[in-house]
Image: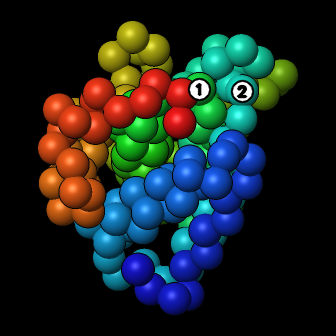
Amino acid sequence: MHPGNWLHIEGGRKKQRELSLDVMIYCVNKLLPRHTTLDLDVHIGNYTATEGIMGSCFHHDANECEIKLDKHQDTYNLILTTCHEMVHVKQYVRKELTDKHVGYPPFLLNLWKGKPHMDRRNEPWEREAWDMQKILAHAYIKEHTKYTIKAIKMLDKSF
């Protein structure tokens, strides 16, 4: 990862922060190897209870994103969710996914590769993230841990 990129992680346990950071660096190297100005702010917290989510990615501006990861995930699912949200970072940074405020009162319109997309059940950016999360997670596990995928899935459920 280029030293000009900035990743800040807070919340959760130390092992969760370390794992998330390592997975994010791996994903940046795979998905955005030439980007030098990423600014990622990551929060690990109780998001399943407070927002009903395991993870989310919010695009602020240019190459700046905020990621939320739920702290109650086991090791395998934390890796998977981190990879999923990093695909969204890639989509925003490469301007494949953009948001536009339209109308009055304004509502958020998602644009996929410049075209409006209104079907919430079949969002192409989510399909891509779901398709790529497992590929990235399994490659990360094979290349950066001493465990097999099966062993990672069996690791402690509460970190």
Rendered residue at 35%/60% (across/down): 27
Q: Residue 116 got which mark?
A: none
**Dot 2: element:** loop
| Residue 34: quadrant of the picture | bottom left
Q: Which of the two labelled residues, at mark 1 and mark 2, occupies the earlier sequence position?
A: 2
Neighbourhood count class around disc 2 (C-alpha, 10 Å): few under 14, some 14–19, many 20 upward: some
**Pick the front one: 4 or 77:** 77
Q: Position of residue 15 (x, y in %)?
A: 56, 52
Q: Given the image, on which type of amino acid does mark 1 rest?
A: His
Compared to residue 72, the image places residue 82 above or below, namely below
* 116 horizontally vs 34: left or right: right
- Label count reads 2
Left or right of residue 137, residue 107 in this image: right
Q: Does residue 69 appear in this view? A: yes
**Which residue bears the numbered disc 1?**
72
Left or right relative to 130: residue 68 = right
Quadrant assignment for the N terminus: bottom left
Q: Nearer the viewer, residue 102 or 5?
A: 5
Residue 147: where, in percent of width, then height? 21, 48
Q: Is residue 128 visible?
A: no
Disc 1, SS: loop
Label 2 belongs to which residue? 46
In the rendered structure, are the residues bearing label 1 and label 2 in contact, judged by CB atoms less than 8 Å apart?
yes
Q: Residue at x 64, y 54 (%)?
A: 14
Asked which quadrant contains residue 149, the reply is top left
Determine the residue positioned at 22% across, 57% down: 146
Can you give x and y, in whole percent of width and height, for residue 155 in the image?
35, 33
Q: Nearer the viewer, residue 79 or 35?
A: 79
At x 17% / y 32%, what residue is drawn? 150
Query: Disc 1 versus disc 2: distance between alpha carbons?
Result: 7 Å
Residue type, mark 2 in image? Asn
